[in-house]
Amino acid sequence: SDYSEEPKRHPALKINAKEPFNAEPRRQDLVSSYITPTEFFYKRNHGPIPVVDDIERYCVSVNGLINKPKDLFMKDIMNLPKYTVTATLQCAGNRRTAMSKTRTVRGVGWDVSALGNAIWGGAKLADVLELVGIPKLTSTTPTGGKHVEFVSIDKCKEEKGGPYKASIPLSVATNPEADVLLAYEMNGETLNRDHGYPLRVVVPGVIGARSVKWLDSINIDSQVCQGFFMQKDYKMFPPTVNWDNIDWSTRRPQNDFPVQSAICSLEDVNVGRNGKIAIKGYAVSGGGRGIERVDISIDGGKTWMEASRYQKPGVKYISDEEKSDKWAWVLFEAEADINSDTEIIAKAVDTAANVQPEKVEDVWNLRGILNTSWHRVHVQVRH
Ligand code: MTE
Ligand code: MO
């Protein structure tokens, strides 16, 4: 594959793999703002970044089990009402490095920053599907379509040189409330090449893998996409399954993201003097569920205190759909007095009262996805 036309990236990103390019920001940079600057937004690729230079001729073909297959050009998509949705995208592999420390897993290593919160601008997929004769809020087309597959322009080795692809249920795709976008803007600017120029899917509340970049076609199908990333990856297996006894067909492709949080103002191990310490980080859940609480422990989980939370700086966060960005993360803050070596822990609770699991061992899986265990950092005090 050809990596000669890769875009320029911010030098402060931590590179986890060079070709394909996979990188995340430093913890401190990640939580310095509610909206993640595009240059600090993690980049997760499976092949070289495609070059689309003839935007006039670029189109998305919509085909499959529909009566009106159609090629949609950029102008057709931009003619639809434009929506902006603030949504956090998180890779299912976020925090994989920590999972690999208990028992080795396969996959690109990530610290806690394989996610970002951006303002995505574009057309609603529900409106796009209406253009090809699929009414809103339908879950089956008259011709038997039940899933919406997104196929990319890029080429990856997992697909034996074919394009990256994924699907979501038609019932989600046609639901305007699900806010699934075909986005051409990120943070108020034209989407850049790393993030899917000229057009990408954004599926809020769902693992990043379904938000296909560099969209080439949309296929309405009776079955779930049979591609590698739906069938042979991004599935959650129990800790007993290993590479010798794995049967991929026994598990369903992961969609919604579970509740997650991480401390970003501290590294895994911190050496400092006793005194006040700032504990800052992010919390986010999937499926549009808000964050009900973030608990902090400064004694290794014996006692807990509640962190303050916000989306708009200085405004206390309320987990209410009307008053908050329902697809977006919440930043949290707490302060503590530390005077001896200790473990600081964060765990979040979402609005469905789901809580992060205590131990990474309990959610260990061979592909190292969805490490949402309590996030722990160690502080060593020098007197
Ligand atoms: N789309 C294409 N075409 N190719 C890819 O490799 N990676 C997916 C998804 N969409 C990918 C893709 C994964 S696993 C994630 S987590 C997100 O894109 C990452 O999006 P980002 O690079 O904009 O952060
Ligand atoms: Mo991902």
Image (cartoon, helix red, strand yellow):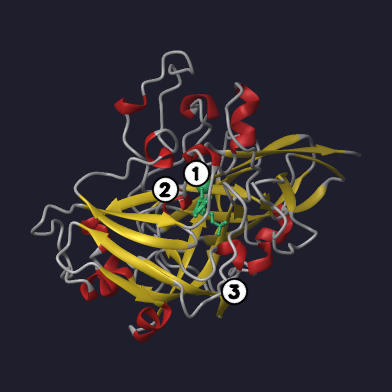
Q: Amino acid at mark 3?
A: Pro
Q: CA distance from mark 3 to mark 2?
A: 25 Å
Sequence-wise, the earlier of marks 2 and 1 is 1
Q: Secondary structure at mark 2?
A: loop
Residue at the image point whose x is 10% and y is 56% from the top: 143
Quick one: label 1, few (<14), some, or many (20+) residues within 10 Å? many
Q: Residues within 10 Å of mark 2 (few under 14, many from 20)?
A: many
Q: Is residue 359 visible?
A: yes
Residue 257, label in figure: 2
Give me the C-alpha separation between circle 3 and circle 1: 27 Å
Indicate the amino acid at tag 2: Phe
Q: Percent position (x, y) of residue 145?
A: 17, 54
The secondary structure type at the circle numbered 3 is loop
Q: Residues within 10 Å of mark 3 (few under 14, many from 20)?
A: few
Q: Quadrant of the C terminus?
A: top right
Q: Give residue 33's position: percent from left, percent from top.
A: 64, 68
- Farthest residue to the left: give it: 142
Disc 1: residue Cβ within 8 A of ligand 2's nearest atom: yes
Q: Is residue 274 left or right of residue 238?
A: right
Q: Is mark 3 within 8 Å of ligand 1?
A: no
Residue farthest top in this picture: 244
Which of pointers 2 and 1 indicates the residue nearer the eye? 1
**Which residue has dot 3 on it?**
313
